[in-house]
Amino acid sequence: MKSTLTSIRQLQPSQFLLVAVAAALVAIYMTLLSKAGDTAHLGMSGLFWLAICSLIWEKRHKLILESSILPSLVGILLIAIVLWQAAVVNVGHFLRISPLISAVAVGLLASGFKGLKQYWGEFAILFFLGVPSVMASFLADISPITAKFSAFLLWYSGFEVQLRDVYVILPTGSVKVYAACSGMEAMTYVLGLSVICLVMFPIGRSKQIIAPIVAIAIGFVVNAIRVAVLAILAAHQNQAAFDYWHEGEGSLIFGMIAVGIFGLFYFFLMHLEESRNQDRVKSLKK
């Protein structure tokens, strides 16, 4: 605790200003998410920002904080764009990519163009916080695939189920899998979590490829299970339970399950990596 207070007291006025600007931008972003009612993205954003704060704090003594007029002007311009968007309360695609823009802006103010490479990990994390979901909105709709997989899960579980395009039909009820329920959002969230893990807890190169792929698969499968559960609730005419798991806190629980499953998987990868390193050390000692 004393070392933390000492580090804060050693900050120069310009560094205090940078911290204040960064904190203000984060606060504005989180406030806009809260006003937009995007609870899921608000929670994930908090996790991502905590990871970034941890990374910055760990290397605070190694950072080169030197900038010049041109990168500072570019940084100020980017911040002005973010603030202008915040003023008009734009909760569209720009809100998803604004954390990355804000981070680049603060990076330019702090370290100039050449110093941006110091923050590659933080930029990567913020890129995967919002950019993939924006890109996904312009890609093909995977709702038919989600509906097909959910129907397969129900059939395999013994239910009498039919599939018509994006409709999962049970004898006494059905659900339509819209684009928002396709699982793309869950996939991008777990993918972003995999990037956080890779940056903060590096593993072997082959496992670095496996982790994001498994993250996407976990997000898709968990969401497909959620759609199957919703179909069962619709068939039982349980509207209250359906609303809870569709739009209420229940929908967030499935997201937490996906995050938890990937966390366990990544812990397993780290354990394998540690065991492999220990075996190498033992073989060298022989």
Image (spheres, rainbow, N blue to C red):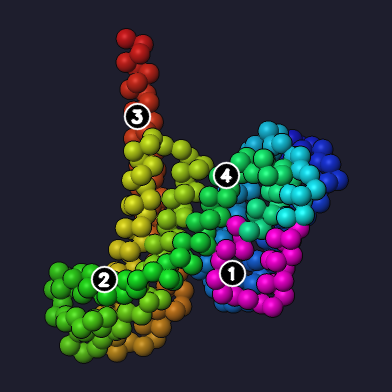
Q: Earlier in the sequence, mark 2 or mark 4?
A: 4
Mark 3–mark 2 distance (CA, rounded to whole Å): 38 Å
Residue 152: x %, y % from top left:
18, 71
Q: Any magenta on residue 174?
A: no
Locate the N terminus and report the quarter of the image it occupies.
top right
Mark 3–mark 4 distance (CA, rounded to whole Å): 29 Å
Query: Which mark is nearer the camera, 3 or 2?
Result: 2
Where residue 112 sits, quadrant-wise, is top right
Q: Residue at x 50, y 43 (%)?
A: 199
Residue type at the position of mark 4: Trp
Q: Which residue is mark 3?
A: 275
Q: Is residue 83 above or below residue 52?
A: below
Q: Earlier in the sequence, mark 3 or mark 2?
A: 2
Left or right of 72? Residue 283 is: left
Label 1: element kind: helix
Label 3: element kind: helix
For the record, the magenta segment spans 76-100
Q: Residue at x 32, y 71 (%)?
A: 142
Magenta segment's dominant SS is helix
Residues at discs 3 and 2 in contact (Cβ within 8 Å): no
Q: Which residue is mark 4?
A: 120
Left or right of 22? Residue 134 is: left
Q: Which residue is mark 2?
A: 145
Mark 1–mark 3 distance (CA, rounded to whole Å): 44 Å
Where residue 162 sits, quadrant-wise, is bottom left
Q: Earlier in the sequence, mark 1 or mark 4?
A: 1
Q: Any magenta on residue 99?
A: yes
Query: Which mark is nearer the camera, 1 or 3?
Result: 1
